[in-house]
Image: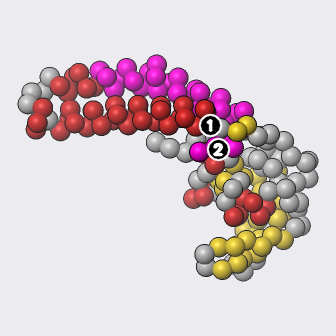
Amino acid sequence: MNDELTRQDIEKIKEEIEYRKAVKRHELLEEVKRTRAFGDLSENFEYKEAKRLKNQNESRIRYLERVIKTATVVSDESAPDAVGFYDKVECRFIELDRVQTVRIVTTIRTDALNGLFGKDSPFGKAILGKKAGDICKIAAPAGEYSVEILSIEKGEDDGSIPLAGY
């Protein structure tokens, strides 16, 4: 794995693990017990679903613990006039003549549909460290396209960017 994460990412992961262990695990175990009482387990969909959700929670805990164990901690600091983690960047896609506001995040928070691009994505690699006015070339499966950095609003990890996952 070896994800590159910020200290804030690791803290968020630890919070999620703690919540899943202290709260969610107990709730899901109670649901398994409740649905087990419905009778014949071979035809008890509620019981099977409760077990599936319990197992999904345990799987997520193991995954997050493994992410922390194998992570490399990176700094989220950047030059005051350059694109860094969590900054709101207004970009113009030159070929499309479309403007979009995006943020560059660590891989565990990537959500391209909501404008959160991972630093290791072609888009993230192209604009990270660039300044307003710069034009970046980005390779994509459909061909190369150009993006102009219009403005950069410095941001920080305020906790509003969720971790990817279920």
For the magenta stretch, what is the residue range?
A: 1-30
**Residue 73 placed where, x, y %?**
73, 37
Q: Is residue 132 magenta?
A: no
Q: Judge from the rendering whether residue 164 lies leftward or rightward of residue 79; answer left or right.
A: left
Circle 2 — which element? loop
Q: Is residue 159 visible?
A: no
Q: Given the image, on which type of amino acid does mark 1 rest? A: Thr
Left or right of 19 on screen, residue 44: left
Q: Is residue 152 rendered to the left or right of residue 59?
A: right
Query: x%, y% of residue 6?
Result: 72, 38
The answer to whether 104 is drawn above or below residue 34 in the figure is below
Instruction: Name the front one of labels 2 and 1.
Output: 1
Q: Are marks 2 and 1 in contact (CB under 8 Å)?
A: yes
Task: Say which residue label 1 marks.
Answer: 70
- Of pointers 2 and 1, the one earlier in the residue sequence: 2
At a point 54% along the width and 31% down the height, the residue shown is 65
Task: Name the residue: 66% across, 80% down.
Answer: 143
